[in-house]
Image (cartoon, rainbow, N blue to C red):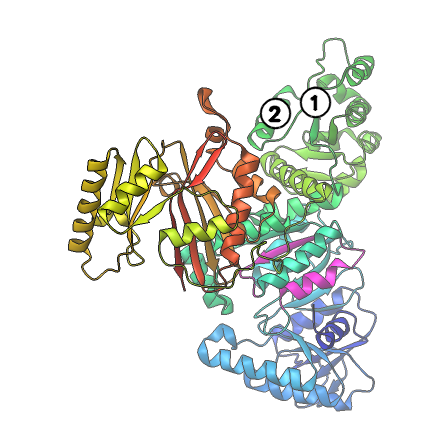
């Protein structure tokens, strides 16, 4: 949880009695922008100008020191030169000012020396009891309360909205605000984080979760500095049924380098982040447009309780576009119920169909009330959770104000959707009485699919396994495992099914082991902690039958391995029954430097690299999460019984995945990877054939 001192300082920052502009000057463009922007949101308290000369600025009374202020204030916006920020802290603290935003740059964003200066800044703030946002920060604005310590002015008078926009980039934050204005989306809280030396994006998310005015969180993220804390806050958001929508940059090598230069941040493994988002029910988007549209959509709909989408349009062509886009996004356009069809027949012309999407036909252009009636009827269908009026606002606006009630009452979660992307005229939307309007068919339907995914997560009541939970039932102390058999024995102690095997040190022991196993054929493999890739040194013989052949294979493996690796420690040769190939999977764990242990499932052998068909989650995983991992694989159709093959027991496989994860966690933080490749799956038979552990 957030430190109480920091929490108190953040509360003063977000709800100050007065604000000091520290470094105010009429000669500075930055200062002019800050003064105008901070005032434009309607703050009810007082602003003061503070500079070395104590000069008036921006029509505000000027002071040379914070101790000269005529009243107590709680917050400051600091934009003095870099080397003067710590001195400003000392002055503010002497006047009891406990919170600040720092615009000044030249700290961690400027390299090694700047990083050291930033560390001194944090140490000074902690000593003085000051909580700050930044440095290199454009500030924040609470549209609901009018409190703004901000360098970005609203492009129009925002109506207080339900979205909290929190961005690690100030310039991108402004771009997002511009797009929100174009789409008639009102924001409730806006913040640009800068370097996050003290307060980070997780702190600001947490501050807005308990805000009743906020219904969705929109994030522009370059890095997550405290992954475990971030996941805790995301879990709280899920409890409160407040969606988090995140645009994360840094997925490519070049963008990662830019982000590092920009904020002094390091970018973690994007695939691990993606898995973390899935488990935490965070919606990841890929563009600014998706970020705003999806957040605004969820603000309007809240939880969508039924997966069915109902669409009605005046155009048959638009209906076809909507049907194609919905299929591409995996959305359900269910056939309408008989009672819905009967109700539609009573209002539609006789030649109209009653399919979904519903073509209301051009007749409705002369009677837009008909369009609204049809949408309301569709919204009451037992399978419909969201209704969409698909069309264009432009000809509707030309009809005149008499159409104002046509689309006003189209169901609690009804909305208007223009197929093409374009700015939305708020006057026109208000005149037509539309509850919510969006543009861009494919983008919005992608948002609808994400909203339904999030809604299912909320309604299911399923939550990720706590990361601090027990690793598993076995009380295994962390230790290093050397060799395939040691790894498989460890897995077996956690209930993972592994292939039976014996390590033979002599030819006679190998023959005796094979007789004891009693199989039709055998696999022989070198057992050595120094040899990870056995086939490369001639350390594997497959499909061997008969005592003489086993003895010959034993001698051949020993000779080949000793020639290739003369100094390797050899424990013996593993004798195990030969298995039919079946479906081969890989189940592997990794230890990400930022997010910690994670588990990967995919097709085994060369296929995981060739097809890139794998699924990843943070550890520990629940059985439901493991089953979801399997279902996310493109190869799941093979496991379900492709072309007459026996279907696999996916619940049993999910249980094996959970057990492998627990076995990995039990080996402690030194474990780098625990790899089972292959895991053989044939119908209900699941068996690990090989295992390897590596350490950091």
530 or 76: nearer the viewer: 530
* Residue 51 makes an appearance in the image: no
Q: Quadrant of the C terminus?
A: bottom left
Q: What's the residue at 78%, 38% (across, down)?
A: 435
| x and y, in percent, of residue 187 in the image | 72, 54
| x and y, in percent, of residue 275 in the image | 54, 49
305 vs 92: above or below: above
602 or 200: nearer the viewer: 602
Q: What's the residue at 70%, 29% (across, down)?
A: 308
| x and y, in percent, of residue 528 in the image | 29, 55
* Residue 478 makes an appearance in the image: yes
Residue 460, image quadrant? top right
| x and y, in percent, of residue 444 in the image | 63, 38
Label number found at residue 468: none
- The mark that comes first in sequence, 2 or 1, is 1
Circle 2 SS class: helix
Neighbour tally class for label 2: few under 14, some 14-19, many 20 plus, Cα within 10 Å: some
Residue behind mark 2: 323
277 inside magenta stretch: no
Residue 446, image quadrant? top right
Residue behind mark 1: 314
| Extent of the magenta region | 200-225
Residue 236, image quadrant? bottom right
Q: Quadrant of the N terminus?
A: bottom right
Q: What's the residue at 69%, 49% (across, down)?
A: 243
In this picture, residue 541 sits left or right of residue 206: left
388 vs 425: above or below: above
227 vs 465: above or below: below
Circle 1 SS class: loop
Neighbour tally class for label 1: few under 14, some 14-19, many 20 plus, Cα within 10 Å: many
- Marks 2 and 1, how far apart at CA: 14 Å
């Amino acid at each position: 949880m957030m430190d109480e001192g920091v929490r108190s300082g953040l509360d003063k920052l977000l709800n100050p009695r007065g604000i000091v502009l520290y470094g105010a000057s009429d000669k500075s463009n930055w200062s002019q922008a800050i003064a105008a922007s901070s005032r434009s949101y309607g703050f009810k308290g007082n602003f003061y100008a503070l500079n070395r000369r104590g000069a008036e600025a921006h029509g505000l009374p000027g002071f040379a020191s914070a101790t000269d202020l005529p009243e107590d204030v709680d917050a400051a916006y600091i934009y003095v030169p870099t080397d003067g920020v710590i001195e400003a802290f000392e002055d503010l603290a002497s006047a009891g000012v406990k919170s600040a935003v720092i615009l000044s740059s030249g700290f961690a964003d400027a390299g090694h020396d700047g990083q050291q200066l930033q560390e001194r800044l944090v140490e000074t703030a902690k000593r003085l009891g000051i909580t700050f946002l930044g440095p290199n920060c454009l500030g924040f604005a609470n549209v609901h309360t009018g409190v703004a310590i901000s360098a970005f002015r609203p492009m129009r008078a925002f109506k207080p909205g339900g979205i909290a926009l929190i961005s690690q980039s100030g310039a991108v934050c402004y771009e997002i605000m511009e797009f929100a204005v174009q789409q008639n989306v009102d924001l409730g809280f806006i913040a640009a984080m800068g370097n996050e030396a003290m307060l980070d994006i997780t702190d600001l998310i947490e501050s807005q979760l308990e805000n009743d005015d906020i219904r969705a969180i929109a994030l522009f993220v370059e890095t997550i500095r405290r992954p475990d804390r971030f996941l805790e806050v995301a879990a709280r958001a899920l409890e409160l049924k407040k969606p988090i929508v995140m645009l994360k940059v840094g997925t490519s090598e070049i963008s990662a380098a830019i982000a590092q230069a920009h904020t002094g941040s390091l970018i973690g493994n994007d695939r691990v982040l993606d898995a973390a988002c899935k488990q935490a029910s965070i919606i990841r988007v890929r563009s600014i447009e998706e970020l705003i549209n999806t957040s605004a959509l969820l603000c309007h709909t809240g939880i969508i309780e039924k997966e069915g989408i109902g669409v009605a349009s005046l155009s048959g062509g638009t209906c076809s576009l909507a049907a194609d886009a919905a299929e591409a996004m995996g959305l359900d356009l269910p056939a309408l119920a008989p009672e819905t069809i009967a109700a539609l027949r009573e209002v539609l012309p006789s030649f109209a169909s009653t399919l979904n999407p519903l073509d209301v036909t051009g007749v409705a252009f002369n009677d837009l009330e008909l369009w609204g009636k049809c949408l309301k009827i569709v919204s009451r269908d037992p399978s419909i959770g969201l209704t969409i009026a698909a069309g264009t606002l432009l000809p509707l606006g030309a009809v005149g104000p008499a159409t104002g009630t046509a689309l006003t009452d189209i169901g609690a979660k009804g909305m208007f959707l223009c197929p093409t992307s374009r700015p939305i005229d708020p006057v026109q939307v208000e005149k037509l009485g539309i509850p919510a309007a969006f543009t861009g068919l494919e983008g919005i339907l992608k948002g609808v699919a994400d909203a339904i995914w999030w809604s299912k997560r909320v309604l299911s009541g399923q939550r990720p396994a706590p990361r601090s939970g027990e690793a598993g039932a076995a009380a295994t102390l962390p230790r290093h495992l050397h060799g395939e058999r040691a790894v498989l024995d460890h897995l077996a102690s956690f209930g993972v099914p592994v292939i039976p095997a014996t390590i033979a040190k002599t030819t006679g022991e190998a023959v005796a082991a094979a007789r004891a196993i009693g199989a039709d054929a055998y696999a022989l493999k070198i057992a050595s902690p120094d040899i990870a890739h056995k086939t490369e040194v001639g350390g594997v013989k497959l499909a061997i039958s008969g005592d003489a052949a086993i003895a010959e294979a034993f001698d051949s493996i020993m000779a080949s391995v000793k020639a290739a690796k003369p100094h390797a420690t050899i424990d013996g040769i593993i004798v195990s029954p030969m298995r039919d190939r079946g479906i081969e999977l890989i189940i592997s764990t990794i230890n990400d430097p930022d997010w910690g242990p994670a588990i990967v499932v995919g097709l085994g052998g060369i296929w995981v690299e060739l097809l890139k068909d794998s699924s990843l989650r943070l550890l520990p995983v629940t059985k439901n999460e493991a089953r979801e991992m399997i279902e996310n694989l493109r190869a799941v159709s093979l496991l379900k019984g492709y072309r007459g093959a026996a279907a696999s027991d996916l619940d049993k496989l999910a249980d094996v995945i959970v057990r492998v994860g627990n076995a990995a966690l039990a080996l402690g933080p030194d474990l780098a990877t625990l790899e089972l490749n292959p895991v053989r799956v044939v119908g209900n038979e699941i068996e690990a054939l090989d295992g390897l552990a590596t350490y950091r």
